[in-house]
Image (cartoon, rainbow, N blue to C red):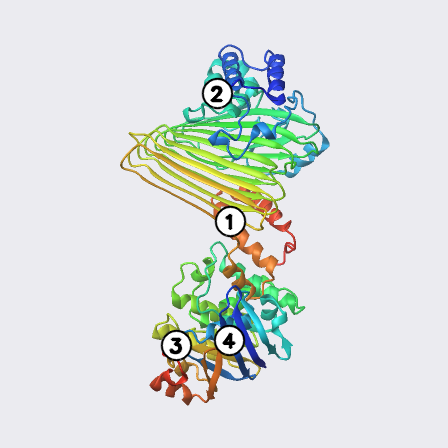
Amino acid sequence: MLEIRNLVVKIADEDKQILNGLNLTVNAGEVAAIMGPNGSGKSTLSYVIAGKEDYEVLDGEILLNGENLLEMEADARAAAGIFLAFQYPLEIPGVATMTFLKAAMNAQRKARGEAELLTPDFIKQVNGAADKLGIDREMLRRPLNVGFSGGEKKRMEILQMALLSPSMCILDETDSGLDIDALRIVAEGVNALRAQNRGFLVITHYQRLLDHIVPDTVHVMSKGRIVRTGGKELALELEKSGYASYGEAA
Amino acid sequence: MAIITPLKTAAEQQLVEQFANIKAELPGAGAMRKVREDAFAGFEAKGLPHRRLESWRYTDLRNLVREAMPLVRRPTRPQAIADRLALQTIAGRRFVTIDGVFSADDSDLTGLPEGIRARSLAEALTESPDEVAAAFTAPEVARDDSALMLNAAFAQDGVVIEIADGIELDQPIVLLALGTGASEASIVSRSLVKIGAGAKVTVVELQESVGAAPVQINHATSFVIGEGAQVEHVRMVSRQRAETVQVQSLLVELGGHAAFDSVAVAVNCGVLRQQSFLRYGGEHSRAALRGINLLRKQEHSDVTLVMDHAAAHGESRELFKTIIEGEGTGVFQGKVVVRPHSQKTDGSMKSHALLLNDGATMFNKPELEIFADDVVCGHGATVAQIDAEQLFYLMARGLPRPQAEALVLAAFVGEVADFVSDEGVHEIVGREIDCWLGQREGAPKPGVA
C-alpha cells in the first residue's frame, strides 16, 4: 500500500538533512509503529508523506498504491487516501468546525468525481461519528480547534479521520498531551477504523500508546533511517533498554 | 529664514474659482454662510492635504487631485440607478442621495414612526440655518483638516436624521449614497444624525457608484449621540471606479453612558481615505471602531482615526483587518488621546493586515497620547502573509489551495464582519466580501464548499 524507497529529505531553506535514505513499507490492513528518539526524523517523515512544503526531497520516492505522492500537492494526496493526524492540530479562528468538515468531505468527494453530500446526510454522519468519540455538539459549533483542550483536539483529528475514510492513516504522536482516559478514547476511535483495506503508521516516542493500539510491526527510526524492524515485542524491549543502543540518547 | 509663499496647485485654484461662483447658490443663510466662508478661508490658507502633513502622510490628496472636477448640481437619474435601487433591499428605512443630492422620491419619508424625523440637508439649512450651521463645527482634533473644511464649504446636500429620546428601532436606518458616474464630477455632501438620550438605533451607510466616470467624493457624516443612547453604525464603500478619489469623514460626539459601535467596510473602493474623529463628551461611554479593507490592483484605503477621550471612564476598541493583493496600499493611523482628567480610560487598538503578494503595501501607525495617569491603553499591529501552517492543515484535509486560502481569508475578516448584528446588513456585507474573495485568481466558484 504505502511504499517509501530511499527517501532523502532536507529542510528547504537550510542545509540540514533529516531523512537519510529511508525505506519503509506498510501493507493494507497493517498497523505499523515507528518509534524513535527526539530528532530522529519521525515528524518530518509524516509531513513529507502528507505534502508539507517546508522540505525538499533530494532522492527517493513515496508510492501509495503505486501512485507517486511526491508529484502531488497536499490536497491531492488527501484525495488519494493519505490522512495525517497532526501532533499539534491547528487552531483556525473564524472557521466553523462544521463548515470545515463539510468543505473537506466535499472537496475529497469532488476530487474522486462523486456528488456533494446533502446536508442532512452530512449532519447525520458527523453526529454519528462524534457520538462514538464522545465529542459533544457544542464543540462542533465552535471554530475549528479554537479553545479546545489537547484531548479535544486529538479527538477532533480522529473524527476527521473517521469521516474522510482514508486508506492510509498516519498518526503523529497522537498520544502527546493526552491523559489516560483521553488516550483510551482516541485509541478506541483508531481501533474502530482498523480494516483490511486500510493501513496505519503510528508514530510515537512511547510504548504506552501501543498498549492500546496494538501494532503488527514496529520500526525503530534513528538519524533519518529505519534501523530495526520487528513485531510488537520490540516496543516493549525499547521501553526497557531505551534508544541508546541505536546510537542516540533518549 | 526663508519665507515660504504657498503656491496654489491647478486644482486649488479651480476650487477657489468654484467657490466664488457657487457660494451664493449653496443652501443656508446667516450663520451657515459664515461657516462656509470661514471653512473656505481655512482651506485657502492650507491647501489640499499633502504628504508632508503627518495625518495625511500616506494619502497625498494634493497629488491625487490634480484637477478639481466640477461640482454636481442637478444629478441625472440613469436607468442604472433605478436598477440598483431595485436590487438594494435591506429591511429598514431607506434614505437615498444621488450624487450627494437627496432624492425624496426614492426615500421612505412617508409613514415614519413617531420620534423619527428625516429631511434633506438643503431643506434643513433653509428651515433652520443657524441651528444646522452649529453642527458643522469641526471637532477640536480635526480643526486643521482641510478636507473637512472643503466639505463644510461646499456641502450642498445630504440627509438629516433626528431620533427622539428613548426611541428604539428594530430595523436600521439606511443612508444609501449612489453615484451616477455619468461624468467626471465632484460630489460634496454631509449627513447629520442626531440621536436622543436613551435611544437605540442602527444606522447603515452604503456608498456605491453605478457609472463609468471616475469622480471625486467628499462626504462627512456627523453623529451627535445623547446620554445613554446605543448606536450601531455600518458603513460600506463599494463598487467604485478605480480612479475615484474619495474622502469619507465620520464625526462622532458621544454623550455620557452611551455606546457607539461601528464597522466600516471598503471593497472595490478606488482611492479612499476614511477618517474618523470621535469625542467622548461624557463619562462611562463606550465606542468601538472596526473595519475591513479588501484591496487589489492599485486600490488604496487609508484608515485614520482619533479617539479623543475628553471624559473619564471611557472605553475604546479599534480592530481593523486588511487584505491586500496586487499593488494595493493599506494605511492604518490610529490615535488614542487621553486628556488629563480622563482617568480610568480603557483603550485597545489593533490593526492586522495580510499581504498576498510582493507588490502589496501596508502602513501601520498606532499612536497613544496619554495625559492621565490611571489608564489602560494598548495597541498592536501586524502585517503577515497567509499562515502557511493553517493552509497546510486545510490542504491536508483535501481542500485545494484556492479554497483553503478563501476559507482562511474569509475567517480573517469574518471576525470583524460578525460585529454587524443586523442580519440583513450582515448578509449584504458578507456578499460583497465573498464576491471580492471570489474574484481572486483561481478562486473556487461559489457553492463548492
- Seen at 72% across and 32% down, the residue is B79
The answer to which image quadrant residue A176 occupies is bottom left
Question: Which one is nearer the viewer's eye here, B49 or A121?
Answer: B49
Query: Crowding at label 3, few (<14), some or many (≥20) Cα neighbours within 10 Å?
Result: some
Q: Amino acid at mark 4?
A: Leu
Q: Which residue is mark 2?
A: B136
Q: Which element is circle 4 on? A: strand
Q: Amino acid at mark 2?
A: Phe
Query: Crowding at label 2, few (<14), some or many (≥20) Cα neighbours within 10 Å?
Result: many
Question: Which one is nearer the viewer's eye here, A226 or B193?
Answer: A226
Give the label, 1 or 4, closer to the camera.
4
Q: CA distance from mark 3 to mark 4?
A: 32 Å
Percent position (x, y) of residue A129? Answer: 49, 70
Residue A19's disc number: 4
Badge 1: chain ID? B
The answer to which image quadrant residue A210 occupies is bottom left
Q: Which element is circle 2 on? A: loop
Q: Which residue is mark 3?
A: A184
Q: Amino acid at mark 3?
A: Arg
Query: Crowding at label 4, few (<14), some or many (≥20) Cα neighbours within 10 Å?
Result: many
Q: Which residue is mark 1?
A: B414
**Is residue A185 shown above or below B296?**
below
Percent position (x, y) of residue B57? Answer: 50, 33
Q: CA distance from mark 1 to mark 2?
A: 35 Å
